[in-house]
Image (cartoon, grey):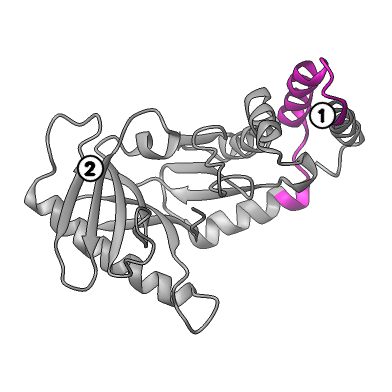
Amino acid sequence: MESSPRIQQAIGKLKMALELDAREIEPLCVELQGLIRSARLPGALAGEIDSALVSQLAGVRAFVVRSSSNAEDLAGFSAAGIYESHNHVTTAERIFASVKEVWASLVSVRSVRLRQQAGISLDECYMGVVIQEQVAADFGGVLVTTNPMNRADFRTVYVNVSPRVTDVVDGTALPMQYLYSTVEGGGRTLSLGDAPADLDARAHDQLQRLAIAGRLLQGHFSPDYTFDTPVDVEWLADGEHLHLVQLRPYSA
């Protein structure tokens, strides 16, 4: 974005409109998104992306191009579903276009308005893009390595699950909710959400494995010797495999 004076000018106008709470906010968002989508990706950056795909994801047939903003999963502001992510991306041309779509979603009317209501300044917001292999999965969701209802309960982790793996992270459906013990073992169903029935025993075994993996990741990424800083993990699973697709510190 820094390579385009027009984009920089549009960002400046949007910041001013937000400060004044002016009626031009929405058309400025639309204009800025259009400029980002139509901008030429700098050659050096395109080359870096291409090289990384060859070295890290050679042979992959389908990709997910997804958002990873610092303005999501914050205390009091989850931002579920307000930023773009693209599945079934199969060509380099489409990867580059999807990257720009994800960038543009940072300044969509909806995301700008929601952050404004939450008191989050545009100056403080940045958008990262993650390009991942698209994998087949039977179910997926979010693991938090604490019990949000009782933060003193160090034994237990909280798991959201959906048979449709996009539903949990984009906020379109109520997930199934579980607590799993990482000390004694075993889980407890809190809610089936919108699901018609509970998961089978094999799936519950996978969730127990996920709970232990989450606790180990918490210890690995802990910023201090107490090892008590919980993490938020997005994951996918089938009968044999667990795929961890994103991890970040958990903000209650």
Pointer 1 residue: 18
Q: In front: 79, or 130?
A: 79
Q: Which x, y percent locates residue 41?
A: 74, 40
Magenta segment's dominant SS is helix
> Could you tell me if residue 239 is visible in this image?
no
Q: Which x, y percent locates residue 241?
A: 24, 57
Residue 247 relative to residue 175: left or right = right
- Relative vertical location of residue 80 with respect to residue 219 in this rendering, above or below: above
- Relative vertical location of residue 147 with respect to residue 125 in this rendering, above or below: below
Residue visible at 49% across and 37% down in the picture:
80
Judged from the image, the secondary structure of the residue bearing numbered disc 2 is: loop
Pointer 2 residue: 138
Residue lying farthest bottom? 225
N-term mark: 1 or 2:
1
Instruction: State which region is magenta.
Output: 19-45
Q: Residues within 10 Å of mark 1 (few under 14, many from 20)?
A: some
